[in-house]
Amino acid sequence: MREQTYYGHGKLLLSGEYFVLDGAKSLALPCKLGQVMNVRHSRSDNPVLHWKSYDNEGKLWFEAKYELWRFRLLTEEDQASLDLQKILRQARHQNIHFLRDEVDTLVETKVEFPLNWGLGSSSTLIYNIAQWAYISPFELLAKTFGGSGYDIACAQSMGPIIYSNLGGTPSWQSVNFSPLFRDKLYFVHLNQKQNSRREIERYQSIELEDKRSLVEQINSLTVAMSEALDLQEFEAYIYEHENLLSSSLDMPRVKDLHFQDYWGAVKSLGAWGGDFALVTSDKGIERTREYFSSKGFDTVLGYDEIICNNPMNVSETLSQLNERLNEIEV
């Protein structure tokens, strides 16, 4: 039996949401939580691809079987099985040798975060399958779900990056975003998952005047946020970023919707209206959690709890990956 393992990090987008689709620089944060994919091959007279996906609690949430010639679905059809079929067929289109061996193939995936958190269950899947198929994850994303690709860059990064995609060419560089005030940065889950594909379509349908100027303003804010020296300066950039997007996209700020009486800054992350928000607080974790819990938002994570911030520690990464491999044996 042959076995292969792949891993991709989850993501949070700190700046440049929406406009990253038009080439804006964005500050993106790979997460300590991601998705592991284990592939096993074994001899068979009637080979099939058997796919099993587990959630962060080890519960099976998706299972499907495909024949290997055209990835025809052998089990009940639903949206998840059709999405996976589309990805597999596109992977085969990009590499005609992908899964051509006449062997049974068992794929088991496990996400390390709740599926409704929006940390990249789809992007980490795309990244892992692309590594398996020896193809470009950016091209696979473009031909399936679409998007800027910042989440694909995060999947393979071990620390914060500044990302852009100009003319279909993704580029990114590591950035030393490890502010001394990061113990005052928190991520609050907004109790709903945003549909990224629908939000991409909605944004692309908006006709904006002088979009180039907006992109340049966001470029400046992204760099400024990554270089902020203290919390007060960082909060000023948050307010400026929120106001710019709110006015240009005609959308309410998340603080106005839910947290008007909150003492710190609040910023939407990624598609507005769901997933996580970034909040600042100088009042400590307990009081901060008490405030958001009183509003019905119980998931409050500290910066160092969830964000990768050590791109050079490869040995630790390999050790953590081995632990994840052991956990997938469910």
Image (spheres, rainbow, N blue to C red):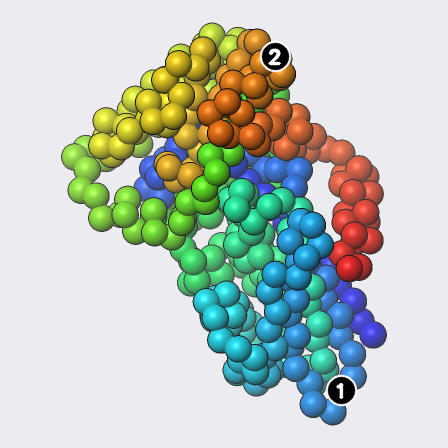
Relative to 250, 88 lies left or right: right
Q: Is residue 242 left or right of residue 330?
A: left
For the point 59% across and 37% down, the residue is 30
Q: Nearer the viewer, mark 2 or mark 1?
A: 2
Vertically, is 288 above or below 125? above
Picture mark count: 2
Q: CA distance from mark 2 to mark 1?
A: 58 Å
The image shows residue 102, relative to residue 323, as above or below, that is: below
Q: Which numbered dot is residue 243?
A: none
Residue at point 46%, 67% (across, down): 79
Residue 208, by quadrant, is: top left
Name the foreground residue: 92 vs 173: 92
Residue that numbered label 1 is attached to: 44
Residue at the image point whose x is 76% and y is 56% from the top:
328
List x then y, in percent, for residue 7.
68, 52
How many C-alpha atoms fall within 10 Å of the one at disc 1: few (<14), some, or many (≥20)? Answer: few
Provide the residue designation for mark 2: 284
Using the rendered view, name the quadrant where residue 266 is placed: top left
Of residue 313 and residue 122, the one placed in the foreground of this image is 122
